[in-house]
Image (spheres, helix red, strand yellow):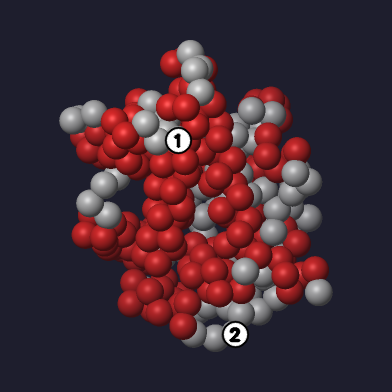
Amino acid sequence: MSHETFIRFGSFAAILLVMAAWESLAPRRTRSVSRATRWPGNLGVVAIDVLLLRLLFPLTAVGVALLAVSRGWGFFNAVEIPRGVAIVLTVVLLDLAIYMQHVMFHAIPALWRVHRMHHADLDIDVTTGVRFHPIEMVLSMAIKLTVVAALGPPAIAVVLFEVLLNATSMFNHSNAMIPLGIDRMLRWFVVTPDMHRVHHSVAVGETNSNFGFNLAWWDRILGTYQAQPAAGHPGMMIGIAQFRDPSELQLDRMLLQPLRGVVGEYPLSREVN
């Protein structure tokens, strides 16, 4: 796994470039805010996230997987399972963990304050898929490392999952046009841009749907699936009710959003009540 960094960075850059080209050549929606206004903040927060995670976590998820194997930690090191099966199960179970984590960040008001920066983007494209507050990234990494330690998976499975997660997040947040017939078929297996875009609607009920990032099954199985936005994709409003001024797309204001304003009606606990 000595080439993990190169594999992850290379795949990240390649997917970013491919999706940016795709959504430029065949956009699903007309941009409401220019890339020049949005991208500096979105990509700036990525740089901060990478530096902070490197500083706070001496071991990556792959490092924890290797440590778990060497120490005999976790489910896959206690139960005899064929390697191929363990790899597939690892990807599926880590994806379920990310789905549950995503629901949790929508359910708990304090966590929603952190997560809402991701939703406060005034448009949605490939860079929205990497726009996460540094606090959310730290919490997410801590959860991921805990799950990896509990599973004790093959390290190659963790690399595969990390690459898939980055790729699918950029893919399903993109503004790329996919023919509707192909989209209907694909979303039985993977989360498509049209499926996930519903999650970025300003409408509370639509925001609290379609939590999946990679596999499309969890939303259908667990009752959080919504096929289409009420206003249709060209007409839906992206973002949240707060932070609608374009100045909120500046990096300094993005970073302070968890501390500003009220929680609002978006958390699942508020919606239920």
Q: Pick out the residue farthest to the bottom.
A: 261
Q: Position of residue 266 (x, y in %)?
A: 67, 70
Identify the image quadrant of the C terminus: bottom right
Q: Residues within 10 Å of mark 1 (few under 14, many from 20)?
A: some
- Identify the mark at residue 86; answer none if there is no mark: none
Q: Position of residue 250 (x, y in %)?
A: 36, 73
Image height of 243 relative to 143, above or below: below
Q: Residue at x 46, y 83 (%)?
A: 259
Hey, what amino acid is under mark 2? Answer: Val
Q: Residue at x 46, y 78 (%)?
A: 257
Looking at the rendered structure, the secondary structure element under dot 1 is loop
**Quadrant hosting residue 247:** bottom left
Direction from residue 17 to residue 203 in the image, left or right? right
The residue pinned by badge 2 equals 262
CA gap between label 1 and label 2 equals 41 Å
Q: Residue at x 75, y 38 (%)?
A: 221
**Quadrant hosting residue 191:** top right
Q: Residues within 10 Å of mark 2 (few under 14, many from 20)?
A: few
Q: Position of residue 129 (x, y in %)?
A: 46, 50
Image height of 144 relative to 40, above or below: above
| 41 or 262, nearer to the observer | 262
Res. 112 visible in picture: yes
**Quadrant hosting residue 60:** top left
Res. 193 visible in picture: no
The residue pinned by badge 1 equals 74
Image height of 202 relative to 95, above or below: below
Q: Position of residue 236 (x, y in %)?
A: 68, 58
Of labels 1 and 2, earlier in sequence is: 1
Q: Residue at x 22, y 38 (%)?
A: 5
